């Protein structure tokens, strides 16, 4: 169904011939870029992470039946941030020649918690070799490589499309090139000549200055996103940015900036998943039995793989919704898994409407398919069981 693209992402191939014939004229030529926020490979995947990943997966697989879709998710792009390089330097300084190949993601996550708790920032000289190894050679620290390997296994178990977790996918621009592009459109305040930082400047649009490179030359997450998306997003008819609600100010800036370069942007904001009523950052640990690995092991003890895949999507998309009002509950997840088992065991017939038409009902005024509208429709009362075409194309 998929093949690698020149951008380093993943592009869905054309819909089957019988579906292509039923698409509206020109629809198959529309191009959509999905660019969700990436998760730093330094900790376990939590319910908040899993929610975002499943939303993106359903959006990708459903929209791929209606348009040409590139799913851009590049850990490579965001390795140069201090958050990642600092962790790697901390590990080498404090743990030495540790063999990470047999560690769990929880064990590596505890090391990350220790790094954040220490509160020490490595100097530029200490981080430079790591940054050069990433930029010049695509190097990944063994601890993060192990985490990405474990995440790849979670993706496979959940039936999620892997956009290239283990691949080297560098951004299209070097940092200097991105700063030059911003300067050319009047959206950069560069104070490096005076020993200062670099700011993204959208003040003429009523948005605040935002530092993207500090006075020591270290880029933050937003600078990395600009390196990737400035050359990429304008090539598509629509670019969809999926991100945490806490990052809304940065993504408003990102939308405004990419629009300046001719991109059409859609923002999808997702609330994090509270645990016992509280939103907790993974940097503080306290995962207990809420990691993705733990959830999958618990569910697999009772349900087979198709039920696990559908049930997880029913809960994290339709059950929790787009906001963050509902805390994670093991019992609610179990109920979604049981509902998935009933849906899969029921009698299913081919939907009288072709699959592209079914999916198009959940698009609104944009090109992408809304995962919540599509998935919550599976739970509607007195609705026929979902068709095999829909389940296999989007959920299993």
Image (cartoon, rainbow, N blue to C red):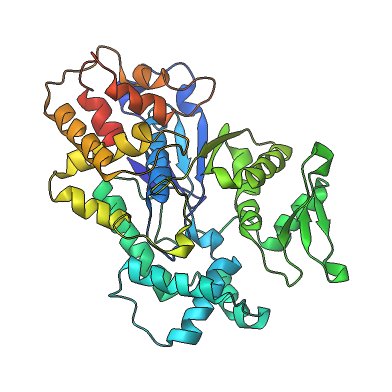
Q: Quadrant of residue 103?
A: bottom left
Q: Is residue 377 left or right of residue 68?
A: left
Give the residue at x 40% y 68%: 109
Horizontal and vertical percent position of residue 137 = 52, 72
Res. 61 visible in picture: no
Give the residue at x 14% y 43%: 303
Q: Name the foreground residue: 350 vs 312.
A: 312
Give the residue at x 36% y 60%: 287
Give the residue at x 77% y 42%: 207
Horizontal and vertical percent position of residue 376 = 34, 25
Q: Is residue 65 left or right of residue 189?
A: left
Horizontal and vertical percent position of residue 281 = 48, 57
Q: Name the foreground residue: 344 vs 114.
A: 114
Horizontal and vertical percent position of residue 267 = 57, 36
Q: Is residue 362 left or right of residue 79?
A: left
Q: Quadrant of residue 144?
A: bottom left
The N terminus is located in which quarter? top left
Res. 53 visible in picture: yes
């Amino acid at each position: 169904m998929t093949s690698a693209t020149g951008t380093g992402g993943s592009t869905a191939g054309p819909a089957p011939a019988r579906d292509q014939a039923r698409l509206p004229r020109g629809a198959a030529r529309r191009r959509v870029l999905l660019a969700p926020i990436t998760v730093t490979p330094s900790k376990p995947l939590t319910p908040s992470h899993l929610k975002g990943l499943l939303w993106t997966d359903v959006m990708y697989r459903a929209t791929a039946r209606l348009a040409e879709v590139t799913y851009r998710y590049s850990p490579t792009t965001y390795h140069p941030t201090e958050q990642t390089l600092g962790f790697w330097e901390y590990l080498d300084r404090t743990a030495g020649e540790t063999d990470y190949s047999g560690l769990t993601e929880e064990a590596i996550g505890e090391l990350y918690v220790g790094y954040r708790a220490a509160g020490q920032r490595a100097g530029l000289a200490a981080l430079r070799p790591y940054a050069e190894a990433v930029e010049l050679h695509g190097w990944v620290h063994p601890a993060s490589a192990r985490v990405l390997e474990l995440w790849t296994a979670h993706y496979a178990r959940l039936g999620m499309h892997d956009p290239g977790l283990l691949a080297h996918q560098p951004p299209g621009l070097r940092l200097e090139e991105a700063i030059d592009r911003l300067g050319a459109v009047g959206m950069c305040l560069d104070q490096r000549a005076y020993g200062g930082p670099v700011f993204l400047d959208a003040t003429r649009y009523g948005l605040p200055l935002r530092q993207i490179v500090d006075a020591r030359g270290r880029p933050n997450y937003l600078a990395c996103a600009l390196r990737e998306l400035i050359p990429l997003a304008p090539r598509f008819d629509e670019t969809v940015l999926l991100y945490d609600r806490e990052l809304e100010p940065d993504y408003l800036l990102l939308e405004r900036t990419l629009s300046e370069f001719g991109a059409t942007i859609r923002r999808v904001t997702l609330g994090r998943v509270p645990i016992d009523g509280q939103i907790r950052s993974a940097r503080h640990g306290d995962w207990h039995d809420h990691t993705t690995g733990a959830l999958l092991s618990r569910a697999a003890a009772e349900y087979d793989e198709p039920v696990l895949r559908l049930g997880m999507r029913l809960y994290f998309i339709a059950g929790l919704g787009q906001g963050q009002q509902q805390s994670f509950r093991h019992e609610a997840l179990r109920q979604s898994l049981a509902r998935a088992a009933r849906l899969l065991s029921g009698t299913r017939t081919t939907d009288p409407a072709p699959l592209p038409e079914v999916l198009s009902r959940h698009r609104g005024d944009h090109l992408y398919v809304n995962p919540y509208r599509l998935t919550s429709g599976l739970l509607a009362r007195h609705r026929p069981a979902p068709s095999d075409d829909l389940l296999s194309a989007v959920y299993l």
